[in-house]
Image (cartoon, rainbow, N blue to C red):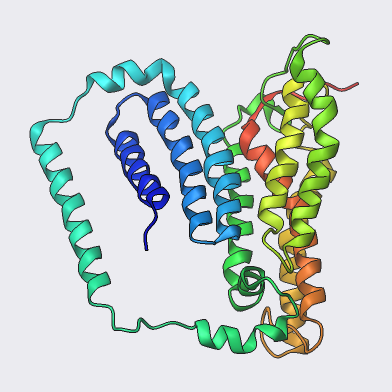
């Protein structure tokens, strides 16, 4: 039976989704999107999809919400002019018809699915023990769908390159973001001294537990990235220049290890990203351990934006 909590979450999700789409003010739309992501996290928990809930809270509501807030602040000077250009009646009708058509096509496709719907779940269940990990999400993402996970990491890396390309020529290779000036007795400074050690330990634990329990590299990397951002926001540490060699090495470390083991699998197991018998769990842990710092640094650099200050030689 559907509980009252599930019905309430569903109604609130629909209301927030409608608000986010209809409202014209950018900050108001972002203000609706962030609680929408948090409610979606609760919805996944109700469905007992803990891994998906953790990812939604960390990436969906957390990081994406922060990026949208930053984008909204940059769009604020031109927002009034954009709002003045209201679309005509014909454009609105066409958009409504197109949206309705997409909804109808999706509904027809779902209703015409065979019963039972085609699924590879039984095949995965029969072969999941070969991966050596008890968490089915980790097993699927790093074994049966490893190429998707590799491409996700590469897409994020290209995203960082795209953000850097927005930097002025004079700032290329410099420090991203603006220098933070916070008083030494500010509460943010106190939090930046107390929380990061705890947050880093929690992030590493979430990563390590992901092999057999809900968690993983993406969730752990998001927590670690948040701690680094907190330290930079407090002014205790400045953002590193993007020209630093160690920074670029960490950025490419995860995808490079992933590709290297994939090629090694082609030699030892006969297929790219295949794992030799008895080595699957070890290789999965090595890949996730390499991806953890790469993802954390990638998320931080996506958040702080393009270089805005030239590097000053000491």
Point out the residue furthest to the right here: 314
Q: Name the residue: 73% across, 75% down.
A: 133
Pick out the residue farthest to the left: 90
Please say if 209 is above or below 182.
Answer: below
**In the rendered image, which quarter contains the C terminus?**
top right
Q: Is residue 252 above or below residue 241?
A: below
The answer to which image quadrant residue 26 occupies is top left
In the picture, measured across the screen, residue 309 lies left or right of residue 31, that is right
Q: How many marks?
A: 0
- Residue in the picture at 72% in, 62% down: 210
270 w.r.t. 85: above or below = below
- Residue at image point 47% right, 36% down: 35
Quarter of the figure with the N terminus: bottom left
* Residue 228, quarter of picture: top right
Residue 171 position within the rendered picture, expressed as x and y whole percent measured from the top left: 68, 26
Q: Is residue 235 visible?
A: no
């Amino acid at each position: 039976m559907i509980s009252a909590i599930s019905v309430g979450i569903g109604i609130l999700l629909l209301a927030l989704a409608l608000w986010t789409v209809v409202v014209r003010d950018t900050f108001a739309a972002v203000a609706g999107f962030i609680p929408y992501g948090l409610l979606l996290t609760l919805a996944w928990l109700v469905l007992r999809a803990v891994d998906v809930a953790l990812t939604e809270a960390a990436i969906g509501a957390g990081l994406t919400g922060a990026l949208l807030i930053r984008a909204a602040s940059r769009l604020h000077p031109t927002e009034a002019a954009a709002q003045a250009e209201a679309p005509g009646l014909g454009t609105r009708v066409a958009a409504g018809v197109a949206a309705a058509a997409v909804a109808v096509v999706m509904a027809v496709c779902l209703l015409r699915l065979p019963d039972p719907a085609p699924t590879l779940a039984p095949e995965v269940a029969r072969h999941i023990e070969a991966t050596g990990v008890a968490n089915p999400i980790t097993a699927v993402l790093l074994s049966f769908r490893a190429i998707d996970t590799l491409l996700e990491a590469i897409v994020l890396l290209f995203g960082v390159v795209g953000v850097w390309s927005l930097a002025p020529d004079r700032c290329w290779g410099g420090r991203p973001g603006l220098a933070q000036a916070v008083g030494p007795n500010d509460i943010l400074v106190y939090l930046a001294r107390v929380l990061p050690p705890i947050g880093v330990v929690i992030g590493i634990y979430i990563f390590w537990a992901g092999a057999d329990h809900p968690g993983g590299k993406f969730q752990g990397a998001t927590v670690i990235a948040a701690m680094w951002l907190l330290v930079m926001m407090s002014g205790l540490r400045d953002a590193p220049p993007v020209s630093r060699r160690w920074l670029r090495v960490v950025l490419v470390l995860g995808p490079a290890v992933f590709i290297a083991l994939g090629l090694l699998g082609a030699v030892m197991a006969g297929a790219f990203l295949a794992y030799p018998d008895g080595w699957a769990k070890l290789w999965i842990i090595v890949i996730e351990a390499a991806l953890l710092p790469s993802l954390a640094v990638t998320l931080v650099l996506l958040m702080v934006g393009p270089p805005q200050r030239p590097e000053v030689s000491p």
